[in-house]
Image (spheres, grey):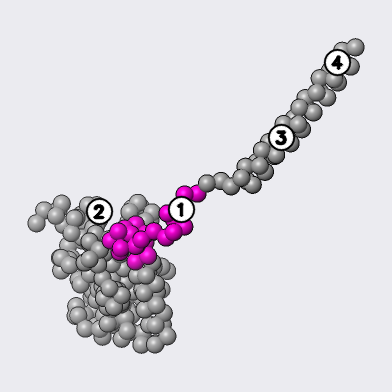
Amino acid sequence: MSDFTTIRRTGLPRVVLRWLQSLDLTISPRHFRRDFSNGYLIAEIFSWYYPEDIQMHSFQNGTSLAAKLSNWSQLGKFFAKRNLNPIRELIDGTIHCKPGAAEIFVQDIYTMLTNRRIKHIQDEEVDFSDRLYQDKLPMVARSTASRAIKTNIKLTEILVEPNINKNRQKVNAIINLHLQRRCLEREQYPERFNIKPTLGARAIRRPSAVSDSILNLQREKSWHVSSKYSFSDVKVQCCNSG
């Protein structure tokens, strides 16, 4: 597989892919959401820079939630020890396989370990929803509200955080975004939703006679004031000249 195909599929800059290849990882990442979610490859990346702190025999390359939580718990202790501050939203998004989270987290690690800046990560807004994917679809194929909830909230999120109120807030946020997108679609494509213009929208707006008279009166007042000041200026100049 060529580098160009890999870049298109993963969304990573070419320089970051070359950096990953130079580390000679034991597992070559193919599906970034799945391969980085358990934290094993993240630990292996940091082991190249901090071999005295990261012991790979204590990490599990498993897919179970218990293996993920164990690996990320060890990584959390390592981050605290070395005063490294990765963005918590990136970690949670990587654990729960959110769209684009693993790719952005790898770029964040790249800048953290190499002190090189990547414009793609620092200058763009982070969004782990399927909004970009939905925007590419025709309106008839876009998700319903229930499908949006199922897509944007993973089962692992509920298992890790079983608090009903917090999960309810997440659901409400997803529904609100879905309703906002629907309202925007109705405004942009009214014929698609068979929206007829209202009587006020179809009426021709003409300025009233009262507004015209008020406007003319204001113009006359401004003209009189300007002519008054210009006349006084001329008079003063004549007196000074005499």
Q: Is residue 53 visible?
A: no
Q: Residue at x 70, y 39 (%)?
A: 217
Q: Give the magenta range.
A: 181-205
Query: Of marks 2 and 1, which one's residue comes earlier in the chain?
Result: 2
| Residue sitting nearer the eye, 78 or 127 | 127
Quadrant (top left/top right/bottom left/bottom right) for the C terminus: top right
Q: Please provide percent x and percent y for residue 203.
A: 46, 53
Residue 68 lies in the magenta stretch:
no
Mark 3 or 2, nearer chain start:
2
Discs 3/2, front: 3
Return the disc, 1 or 4, that comes first in the chain's sequence.
Answer: 1
Badge 3 marks a residue whose secondary structure is helix
Q: Give me the disc on residue 13.
A: 2
Please name the residue shown 80% across and 23% down the image: 231
Rendered image: mark on residue 228: none
- Find residue 238 and name its label: 4
**Left or right: 59 with respect to 86?**
left
On residue 220, the disc is 3
- Closer to the camera, 134 or 47? 134
Query: What residue type is disc 3 on?
Result: Glu
- Specify few, some or many for label 2: CA neighbours under 10 Å numbering under 14, 14-19, or 20 or more: some
User: What amino acid is at disc 1?
Assistant: Ala
Residue 160 lies in quadrant: bottom left
Dot 2 falls on a residue whose secondary structure is loop
